[in-house]
Image (tube, rainbow, N blue to C red):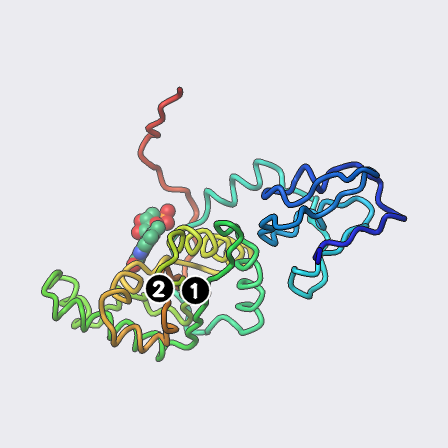
Amino acid sequence: MSQIVVDTAICKKDGACVAVCPSGTLAINEEGFPQEIPESRCILCGHCVAVCSCDAMTHAGLPDEPLLPAFRQLPSPEQMDGFLNSRRSVREFKDKPVSRETMEALLDVARRAPTASNSQNLKWIVVSGPAKVQALSAETVNWIRASGTNPALVERWDSGHDFVLRGAPTVVVACAPADYDWGKQDCAIALTFLELAAEARGLGVCWAGYLTRVAGLHPPLRKALSVPEGYVVRGGLMLGEHKYIYRRVPPRKPLSVLWV
Ligand SMILES: Cc1cc2nc3c(=O)[nH]c(=O)nc-3n(C[C@H](O)[C@H](O)[C@H](O)COP(=O)(O)O)c2cc1C
C-alpha cells in the first residue's frame, strides 16, 4: 500500500513533488496527480511533503513530528562569510557545562544535516561536566603513553596540561555503524552543523581529534564513552563558554584550485 497520500481536492498538480524526489518514487498519473510508483525505493527524505505549495501530500513513512516552516530570512553573504571566517578552534573554556537544553537544541540541528541516502543512522554521546571529560582525557593519554608514539605529549599531560580535551566542560561524540561506508562523512557534516549552531549561540568549540582517534584503538576509552555495540566513534567536539575572544581572522595558505 502507498505510504504517500495526495489530497486531490487541493493538489495544484504543479509536479514539484515529482521533480524534487531524488529516488524516482513519484510519477504523474493519468489524471495529472502525483502517485507513488509501486516497488520504488523511497529514501524518506520528506522533500515531496516539504515542497508542496498547498499541503496536499502526507507521507506515512516519515517520523511523526510536525514539519517546521522553512527559514527564508537568509543572512547576507557578508554576514554568513564573516560568521564562518570568524569561527575558531577554542581551547580555553570556562568550567560551566553547556546546558541540557542548549545541547538538545544543537543536536536537533545536527540531526537535520545531510546523510548519505538519508540514512540518519548516527548515535550521539554527550559527556557533561569537567570531571567526566577529564576522565576521558586520562584514558586517551593511557593509550598514547602505552603506545610510545608521542612522549612529548605525555610529558605535557604529566605536567598538568590537558591537550586532549583542553579542560572543556562538555564533549559531544558522533558514532556511526562500524560497517557503514559513509560514517566518517555523515558524522563530520553533522558535527559541523552542530559546531556552527553552537558558535551562533556564542559558544566555543574545538574538534576532538585525539579522542576520536584513540576511541577506535583503545577499548577502555570506548567503554568510558559508552559507545554502543556495533558502532564506532567518527568524530567529537569539545564545547563550552569562551575564556578569550578572537579579534582577528588568522591568515591561511593560498588556495590550490584547478579550474577545469
Ligand atoms: C578533524 C579535526 C581534528 C582536530 N583535533 C584537534 C584536537 O584534538 N585538539 C585540538 O586542540 N585541535 C584540534 N583540531 C583543530 C585544528 O587544530 C584547527 O582547526 C586548526 O589549527 C585551525 O584553527 P582554527 O580551527 O581556529 O581555524 C582539529 C581539527 C579537525 C578538523
Which residue lies under the disc numbered 2?
A: 233
Front residue (pair 110, 80): 110
Which comes before the other along the chain, label 2 or label 1?
Answer: 2
Which residue lies under the disc numbered 1?
A: 239
**Residue at far top of view:** 260
The answer to whether residue 104 shows anywhere in this view is yes
Q: Residues within 10 Å of mark 1 (few under 14, many from 20)?
A: many
- The quadrant in which residue 232 appears is bottom left
Dot 2 amino acid type = Val
Front residue (pair 39, 228): 39
x and y, in percent, of residue 221 in the image: 28, 73
Marker disc for residue 93? none
Give the SS element for disc 2.
strand
**Residue at far right of view:** 9
Name the front one of labels 2 and 1.
2
Residue 92 relative to residue 69: left or right: left
Q: Residue at x 44, y 62 (%)?
A: 242
In the rendered image, the quadrant that contains the C terminus is top left
Label 2 – label 1 distance at C-alpha? 17 Å
- The quadrant in which residue 126 appears is bottom left
x and y, in percent, of residue 151 in the image: 10, 63
x and y, in percent, of residue 248 in the image: 42, 43
Against 120, is 72 above or below?
above
Residue 76 relative to residue 147: left or right: right
In the rendered image, the quadrant that contains the N terminus is bottom right
Q: Residue at x 37, y 52 (%)?
A: 181
Dot 1 amino acid type = Leu
